[in-house]
Image (tube, helix red, strand yellow):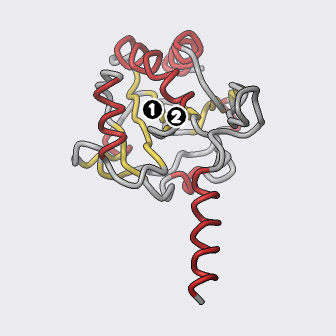
Amino acid sequence: MRALSGILGATLALVALAGCGTPRTGTGGFVAGDGSITVIAPEEREPAPVIAGETLDGEQWSSESVDGLVIVYNVWGSWCPPCRAEAPALQAVADATADRAVLIGINTRDLDRAMPQAFVRANELTFPSIFDPDGSLLLAFAGQLPPSAIPSTLLIDPQGRIAARVIGVTTEATLLGLVDDLAAGG
């Protein structure tokens, strides 16, 4: 029984650590998304689920508190090198679009708050991130976000509908363009 528990534990650990995206990329077998962008036509958009939870700072956050703005969800983990690479772009977008968008991180697969809090401090991030160690919030986006697509970014239009996604690392220019289009009614 002890051997079976050990095998099960090792298997679960490997599954939890696997990925940081979908397709394979070049260095060291690291898995990363390809940066593909999907924009959904306004007439085909579905209502976004309510996302709520406790931030890394212990505050409560809910998408129900956001009205008339674009919501930019960024799924990340402190263990994910591409997440570190895109952090400055996310902060720049949060700063540049504060009048028309809310950027909220969804921190996943970090087992405690210490590492993601250190990540936030090291990258000087001022936007909040919900702590989602088991990925349960991501289940609300089943069919929209592949579960291993970390980092990934999902944009919700001002009407509360799923409007766009980026699988993999995004850029400041990409996100600014998407936010501006959605805020303008696109």
Picture coordinates of residue 130 (x, y %)?
A: 36, 45
- State the residue at coordinates (49%, 34%): 74
Quick one: label 2, few (<14), some, or many (20+) residues within 10 Å?
Answer: many
Q: Is residue 122 above or below residue 78?
A: above
- Closer to the N terminus: mark 2 or mark 1? 1
Mark number displayed over residue 71: 1
Q: Is residue 62 above or below residue 162?
A: below
Quick one: label 1, few (<14), some, or many (20+) residues within 10 Å?
Answer: many
Quarter that holds the N terminus: bottom right
Residue type indicated by callout 2:
Ile
Q: Are marks 2 and 1 in contact (CB under 8 Å)?
A: yes
**Residue 65, picture quadrant:** top left
- In this picture, residue 108 sits left or right of residue 17: left
Mark number displayed over residue 156: 2
Give the secondary structure at mark 1: strand
**Residue 114, picture quadrant:** top left
Mark number displayed over residue 91: none
Q: Nearer the viewer, residue 95 or 133?
A: 133
Quarter that holds the C terminus: top right
Q: Is residue 174 above or below residue 126?
A: above
- State the residue at coordinates (42%, 36%): 105
Picture coordinates of residue 31 (x, y %)?
A: 69, 37
Residue type indicated by callout 1:
Ile
Q: Nearer the viewer, residue 2 or 74?
A: 2
- In this picture, residue 7 sits left or right of residue 74: right
